[in-house]
Amino acid sequence: MASQEKVLIVEDELHALTGLAELVSGWGYRTDTARDGVEALERVQAWQPGIVVTDLKMPRMDGLELLERLSEMKQDQTVVVLTAQGSIELAVEAMKMGAYDFIQKPVDPTRLRTILLNATRQRDTERELEVTRRKLRDTGVLGSLVGSSRQMQEVFALVERVAPSNVSVLITGESGTGKEMVARTLHELSPRKAKPFVAVNCAAIPETLIESEIFGHEKGAFTGALERRAGCFELAEEGTLLLDEIGEMPVGTQAKLLRVLEERKLRRLGSKVESAVDVRVLSATNQDPDEAVANGHLRSDLFYRLNVFNIHMPPLREHKEDIPAIVDSMVAEMNRKHDREVTGVDADMMARLMAYDWPGNVRELRNTIERAVVLGGAGTIEPQHLPPGFGMRAVKAAGDMATAANAIQVEVGATVDEGERRLILKTLESTNNNKTRAAEILGISLKTLHNKLKDYASTGAEE
């Protein structure tokens, strides 16, 4: 594969240019060179390389301008940028403009070879993606995602654009909207699809264990570390890692994550050795990321690095026209999962599904359809297969909130913390101690709710 791919090296420093060209040629690629962006444009038009490896800072025309000109000329090159220490911001800007990846100087040969191999696979993936686009136009399906509405078509367009690349993507949206499905689809449509997809929920891991989960640890690194353990980065090697609820990650861990993203190297807890990692990192949050940065929950430099591209998943209530197609897809999935023979949904039930606002979004719809398929077994599923009180839950939830608020009495002179404690405990009471539902009503994460309840228990303030 390498011997058939042309690589243009663009570097103004002659010694570095010659060394890189010899190195890449030794791996079987056909290479050519240019000393700046102007010369590179001439070589691109005359030689038509598949990959361009370019320095960012050069005379006459720098790497960013070269990238912009290639885009304007609608050239089909995959661009990898070289950046000096301290110029990560420029590299991230280049990726936002369409660069495939970046590598810091001095160039690590192993890292460069991996990037070139992945870039070559990306070009093959883009050709395969054209078949997927035709399927999308015909059926409204893209990977794990379903929908023909304007909102979902906008999501599909972004997924198609960034899936074959190596850029970081921040996926935002309410709880249950399908952020992990977007991440899986990005992985399925990428050159990394044959490698692992690993998802970790930062809100579900205790703060004392999250660094071990993500970076791994050596035997004896801390009390209870009885054996060496690989972290999520190592488990996802050459594949894709999704960091869900990134805003719930402790700030100290965020700093270490930023270092791994910038240097592409990590050190297990308790180890003195760094190892290179080749992982595409995706992240997701149901918070407003700008607000999370403003209130200190998310480091601004990490947000900048993760948010090269943003994909926002709309709540289901904003694209209800997709519900019939989503339901058809879910029925087929649940038939396979539970060995049922449901053929569809009757008109009355579909009308009820369409009239409901789905506060739990696609996740709630999935649970509803799974229950109905299991109960129905075969033929069409009907309103009798819906959960008891279906359609009243959103009203009931709103009523629960109002009742809880009205029932709480806070004396003058009480602290804000005391008022918050009473609200949390009363909301838990109204949900029959359903912590997930209580967290949704309160507008906080499940992890935050658990932490507050733990604090109440430790201080004897839990009623």
Image (tube, helix red, strand yellow):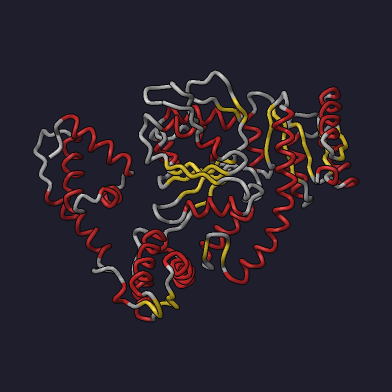
Number of disc labels: 0
Q: Where is residue 267 drawn, in percent x and y? A: 54, 25
- In the shown orientation, is residue 207 left or right of residue 217? left
> In the image, what residue occupies the spot 39% across and 52% down?
175
- Tell me the quadrant of the picture where the C terminus can be found: top left
Q: Quadrant of residue 374?
A: bottom left
Is 57 or 6 nearer to us in this picture?
6
Q: Where is residue 165 drawn, in percent x and y? A: 66, 46
When the figure is inspected, residue 141 is found, relative to residue 37, above or below; the finding is: below
Is 213 or 95 nearer to us in this picture?
213
> In the image, what residue occupies the spot 44% across and 30% down?
211
> In the image, what residue occupies the spot 44% across and 66% down?
334
When the figure is inspected, residue 126 is found, relative to residue 387, above or below; the finding is: above
Q: Quadrant of residue 296?
A: top left
When the figure is inspected, residue 436 is found, relative to residue 319, above or below; the finding is: above
Q: Where is residue 239 drawn, in percent x and y? A: 60, 43
- In the shown orientation, is residue 354 left or right of residue 459? right
When the figure is inspected, residue 346 is found, relative to residue 365, above or below; the finding is: below
Q: Where is residue 373 drawn, in percent x and y? A: 38, 71
Q: Quadrant of residue 12?
A: top right
Is 44 or 244 nearer to us in this picture?
244
Q: Residue furthest top?
A: 272
Q: Residue furthest right?
A: 46
